[in-house]
Image: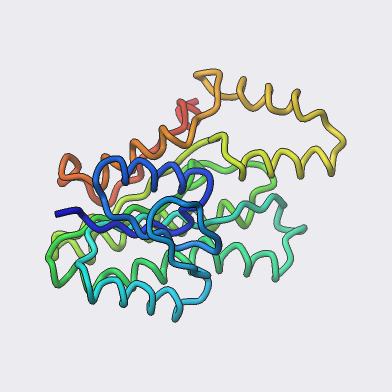
């Protein structure tokens, strides 16, 4: 019988790579996103709407026990605290943090009933370090890392594991959008900025979304059944510097 996995934000970037890899490994994947990708069973969903997230996941859980949640939906925002408006802060937290809260809270009844489950939250290397002009994003990813730890402790008695994946600089549409926005504001050359980003990494390249997906697949599997409450860094050595 196929294991049931819910992925939020599974239509592009890291999320899409996760959905594809889980499908290749015989998972039944529900993709909760605003638009479809053609992979997995699509459920149109705005993760900032807690009631909507809860209703969709409850509907799924009534038919099938949920084995895995990958809370991946998120946005990037680049600014220091002075240049972060209250609306900016709300938008980042509504998607990155409240979206994760909604999904985790909704899957827990099914996982508790089944006395089994793996919850994987998409955090960032910025849960461990700070980066310039990243006030709201950094704050949100630190909150997600905390959510993984507290959930791991609170639900260990139900054999529910919770871990956070902390990617460094991964070459996704989100990455390219951030670089484009920076170049538009600063007038910098994109090719040069892209080269500089590669050289900042000890491995002298950017990570690929497929590599993050492999880590997620491992954490979802029984091979990781003694791993919970951890922050799994996948950053090419950046935070080791």
Return the residue found at the far front.
Answer: 38
Q: Nearer the viewer, residue 105 or 221?
A: 221
Residue at the right extreme, as displayed: 187
Q: Is residue 18 above or below residue 105?
A: above
Residue 66 is situated, as x and y percent measured from the top left of the image, at: 24, 64
Q: Residue at x 81, y 28 (%)?
A: 189
Place of residue 138 in the rendered image (x, y in percent of width and height, measured from the top left): 56, 51
| 69, 236: nearer the viewer | 69
Please determine whether, in this image, residue 195 is positioned above or below residue 162: above
Q: Is residue 196 left or right of residue 164?
A: right
Q: Nearer the viewer, residue 53 or 196?
A: 53
Q: Position of residue 51 (x, y in %)?
A: 44, 81
Quarter of the image containing the N terminus?
Answer: bottom left
- Picture quadrant of residue 7: bottom left
Residue at 51% from the left image edge and 76% from the top image edge: 49
Q: Is residue 51 left or right of residue 180?
A: left
> In the rendering, at what x and y percent does residue 171 appear?
57, 34
Give the quarter of the image for residue 184.
top right
Classify 95 as above or below 122.
below
Specify the quadrant of the image occupied by residue 17: top left
């Amino acid at each position: 019988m196929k294991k049931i996995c819910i992925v939020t934000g599974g239509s592009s970037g890291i999320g899409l790579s996760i959905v594809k890899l889980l499908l290749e490994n015989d998972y039944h994947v529900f993709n909760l996103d605003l638009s479809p990708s053609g992979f997995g069973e699509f459920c149109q969903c705005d993760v900032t709407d807690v009631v909507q997230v809860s209703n969709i996941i409850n509907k799924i859980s009534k038919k099938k026990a949920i084995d895995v949640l990958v809370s991946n939906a998120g946005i990037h925002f680049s600014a220091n605290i002075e240049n972060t408006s209250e609306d900016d802060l709300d938008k980042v937290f509504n998607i990155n943090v409240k979206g994760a809260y909604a999904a985790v809270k909704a899957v827990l009844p099914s996982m508790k009933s089944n006395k089994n489950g793996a919850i994987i939250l998409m955090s960032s290397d910025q849960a461990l370090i700070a980066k310039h002009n990243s006030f709201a994003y950094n704050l949100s990813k630190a909150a997600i890392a905390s959510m993984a730890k507290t959930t791991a402790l609170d639900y260990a008695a139900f054999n529910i594991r919770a871990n956070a994946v902390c990617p460094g600089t991964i070459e996704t549409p989100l990455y390219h959008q951030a670089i484009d926005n920076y170049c538009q504001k600063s007038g910098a050359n994109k090719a040069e900025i892209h080269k500089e980003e590669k050289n900042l990494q000890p491995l002298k390249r950017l990570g690929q979304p497929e590599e993050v997906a492999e880590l997620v697949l491992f954490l979802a599997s029984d091979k990781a059944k003694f791993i919970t409450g951890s922050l799994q860094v996948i950053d090419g050595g950046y935070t080791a510097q």
